[in-house]
Amino acid sequence: MKKLFITLIILMAASLTAPLLGAAQDPMETIQGPINEVLLILQSKSSKGTVSEKERIRAIINDFFDFTEISRRALARNWKKFSPDEKTAFIRIFSELLSNTYINQMQGGFENDTVIFISSEKIKENQAVVRTKIIRVNIEIPLDYRLKKKNDSWAVYDIKVEGISLVKNYRGQFKKILARKSPAHLIDLLKKKVAK
Amino acid sequence: MKTAFRITISLAVALFFASCAHAPKSTLSQSVPSKSKENAKEIILADNSEKIELEEGDELSDEEWDELEDEEDGYVLADPFYPINKIIWHFNDAVFYALLRPVSVVYSAVLPASFRQGIRNFFTNLTTPLRYVACLLQGKGEAAQAELVRFVVNSTTGFLGLVDTAAIWMPEFEKPSPEDLGQVLASWGAGHGFYLVLPFYGPSSLRDGLGFAGSYYLNPVSYVKPVETSYYIKIGEAVNDASISGKDYMMLKEAALDPYEAFKDAYIQYRQKLVEE
C-alpha cells in the first residue's frame, strides 16, 4: 500500500509540474485547479452537506464546463428544433441537472476519493482530452475530460467515466424522447426531474 | 444435452450473420444543410445574470452531425425484443431496490469496506480461469501471463485471493483489463446481434449472453455441490458487489431521464471500451 501511495504522490507532483502548452492555458491546468477546489470543499468538514457548499461547487463547475456546448452535443441534430428561447431554457435546466447530479454524488459519500491527473493530450487543434483517475478504497475509476478551446480558453464539453460518455448517454435518451415529443415537452421533463 | 448444444451452435452461426445487420441509422428528413447567418446572441438572464452565448453561426448540418456521431459512436444496437426487455429491466430494478439494496446496506453496516473489497478480490481471483482462457483465445499472451502470475501470487501469499498482494509485490504484472467470452466472440468479428436484458444479470446482448452462458462452465463456483449452495454463493457475491457498486447503479438511474435507454447506452459504450482494450 505504501508503494502505491508514494507512486500517487509522485504522479500528482509530476502532473503539477507539467510544462505549459503555448500561450493559451493548458487543458490540464484549466481543470486541475477547479477540481482540486471542489475536492477541498468536499473534504472540509465545516460546510458538510449545506446549501452554501452546493452553491460554491456549482459556481466552480460553471467556470470550467461549457454547458452550451454540452447541450448542443447532447441534442445533436435536434438542436435546430429548439427556438432560441427554448435553447436558453434547455441549457439552463440541463446544466442544473448535471450539476446537481454531480454534486449530490460527491456529497453523498464519495468524500474519501482522491483524484490523480494522468495526462493531457491534444486531439485536434482545438480539442484535448485530460485523463484522470478516481481512487476509491481499492478501486480505480478512469475519468476522462474532453475539452474544447473557444476564444483562447479551454472548457469541458464531455466526460467519460469507464469509457461511457456523458453526452452520448444523454443524446440517446433525448433522441428517443424528441422523436415523438416537442422540445417544450423535453424541457418540462427536465424541470420535473430537477425539482424532485 | 445434444439439443442444447445444437441450439447454441445455431445461435452462434446466427450471430455472425447478425453482426453485419445492426439497425440502420434512421435518416430523418432529408433536410438541406442550414447554416444560420444570424449574429451571436447574448442573452442575459434576469435572476442570476448568467450570460449564455448562442453562436448561431456555429450550426452544424444534419450530415455534419452524422459525421460527428460516427466519429464518436459507430454502433447502433437493435432492440427487437424491446417490450420484453423493458419488462425484465423493470423487474431487475424492482429486485434491486426491494431486495438487493436493503440487504447490501445491512451487509455494509456489518462488514467494513476493506473486508468487502477482500471478498470481491476473492471472487475475482476465483474466476481467473475464465479470464485466462479468454485472453488466450484472443491471442493476448501478455495479459494471459499476467492473469496467471497474479492468480498464483494472490492465491498463495494473498490468502486465497483475499488480498491483492500481486498488485503490491509484482506491479510489473499490471492487472489486465478483464476479458470474457463475449469479448472473445467480438474479437472474432461477431457483432452484438441484438440487445437483451437478462433476468437478474441485467443488460446483455445475443453475443455477450452466449459468452455469459459459456462462462458458467469456467466458473468454479458452478461446480459446487449441492447446487443450492452454488446459488447461495453467487447471491452472496451479488450482495457483496452491490454493497460496493450499488451507488453507481443508483447514480446512473438518478441522472437519467429514460433509465432503460440510459443503461442500454451505457452498456454498449462500456462493452465497446472493454473490447478495445
Image (cartoon, coloured by chain):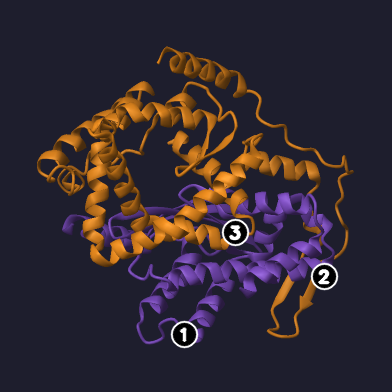
Chain colours: A purple, B orange
Q: In the image, which disc is placed on residue A195?
A: none
Q: Quadrant of residue B78?
A: top right
- The total of numbered circles placed on residues is 3
Task: Tell me the subunit letter for badge 2.
Answer: A
- Looking at the rendered structure, the kind of residue marked 3 is Ala
Residue A54 lies left or right of residue A93; in this view the side is left
On screen, residue B149 above or below A6: above
Does residue A17 appear anywhere in the picture?
A: no
Residue picked out by circle 2: A85
Badge 1 local density, few (<14 within 10 Å), some, or many (20+)? few
Observer-nearest of B149 and A6: B149
Front position in the image: B125 or B70: B125
Q: CA distance from mark 2 to mark 3?
A: 24 Å
Quarter of image, res B103: bottom left
Q: CA distance from mark 1 to mark 2?
A: 32 Å
Q: Which mark is residue B256?
A: 3
Q: Position of residue B104 (x, y in %)?
A: 34, 59
